[in-house]
Amino acid sequence: MAKNSSRSIGRHLLHIPGPTPVPDRILRAMDTPMIDHRGPEFSRLTKRCLEGLKTIFKTTKPVIAYTATGTGAWEAALVNTLSAGDRVLMVETGQFALQWKNMAEKLGLKPEFIKTDWRVGADPAEIEAKLREDKNKEIKAVCVLHNETATGCLSPISEIRKAIDKAGHPALLLVDTISSLASTDYRHDEWGVDVTVGGAQKGLMLPPGMAFNAVSDKALASSKTSKLPKSFFAWDDMLTMNKQGFFPYTPATQMLQGLSVAIDMLHEEGLDNVFARHDRLAEATRRAVRTWGFETICRDAKYYSPTVTAVLLPEGHDADAFRALALEHFNIAYGASFGRFAGKMFRIGHLGDVNDAALIAGLAATEMALALAKIPHKKGGVQAAMDYLVTQHASPARAAG
Ligand code: PLP
């Protein structure tokens, strides 16, 4: 097609699995004059945000908000609870699990990595078996991702908690919810999680730049004896200052302005409706993928992710070239491929401020791009997704959204 300029027309279709589209209402809330970050108005804002976050993590315990991305909150979870040489049990669900494991090694921990083929979530039975083998209770923490963003596999956290208990093992449970929080059901207290790691730029619909640790009493107790060096990420300074609505350093003030509104928006929709919307968008996406004749990377329905669907392209077709073509012609961005699936898959993010019509636009752009790229596929994926969404809206029991 002839081109006069490089200006891209209309809205960019941001279908990466985070950062997700930031709603205008949040952008407006962030677009405010600076206020004193040690003054009374800011203290009220901080307290509102930290209390509000508890309702999202479903905890009555403290939630710590760092000026960092998710990677920082990973580090915070490890350095506050563990000591050099501690053994930790991790599950290789995909690229992000691998990165957390690499970080643990760099910090002087001794990770034991349960392998998978990157096409399933973490298996509670395998975790239980590993913990039973640890007769001397040397493993200090089990670290798992709730949602592996690299593959689109969700792990059963409450089952993993039960597995740890069945093994009679005292290890802490550390869970990464960076691409699941505020998009699918998550219960820090009820599921007995010790540290939940979260990030701003996905289900919370904010820009990147803030990340969280929700902390159980047991984790807090571990922080009193943990010996890994910590300063910026130390929980004790944070918790002391947070009580007054302040931080030990200058926080990302505009992120808090946005966060306060994001929490309101999630509750206005209703968390259960937010979760039902994500389930619906994920199922519509999978129906499109199936109709096209492709496999999802997640190969077992019990692990299907509500927030991201990774699509395996037929042999001989380069997924990175496909992403570049789709971006150039249809202004759509997908998540890149990683590790053992480098160049073989692309990931469709369907999380955050996304509604049915926005998803259909993304799937339509994808179906056009597949045709343009001459990747063999069956037509009708978008139709299958639309048909499914219509049935969901027609059903009297449907969730709002
Ligand atoms: N964990 C998961 C599951 C992620 O999806 C990501 C990033 O996408 C990270 C950790 C790393 O977070 P960040 O890139 O915000 O540092």
Image (cartoon, rainbow, N blue to C red):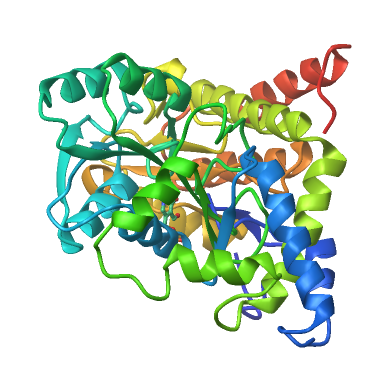
Q: Is residue 261 left or right of residue 207?
A: right
Residue 46, visible in the rendered structure:
yes
Q: Is residue 56 left or right of residue 39?
A: left
Residue 97, position in %: x, y? Answer: 30, 45
Question: Which residue does the image show at 79% across and 68% down from the upper left?
Answer: 45
- Against 376, is 125 above or below? above
- Against 116, is 209 above or below? below
Residue 389, position in %: x, y? Answer: 75, 24
Q: Quadrant of the image for the C terminus?
A: top right
Q: Quadrant of residue 315?
A: top left
Residue 320, position in %: x, y? Answer: 36, 54
Query: Looking at the image, which is closer to me, 388 or 397?
Result: 397
Q: Is residue 352 left or right of residue 344?
A: right
- Against 380, is 106 above or below? below
Residue 182, visible in the rendered structure:
no
In terms of image quarters, where does ligand 1 lie? bottom left
Q: Tag count in the figure?
A: 0
Query: Looking at the image, which is closer to me, 339 or 319?
Result: 339
- Against 261, is 130 above or below? above
Q: Quadrant of the image for the N terminus?
A: bottom right
Question: Which residue does the image show at 76% across and 73% down from the upper left?
Answer: 43
Q: Quadrant of residue 364?
A: top right
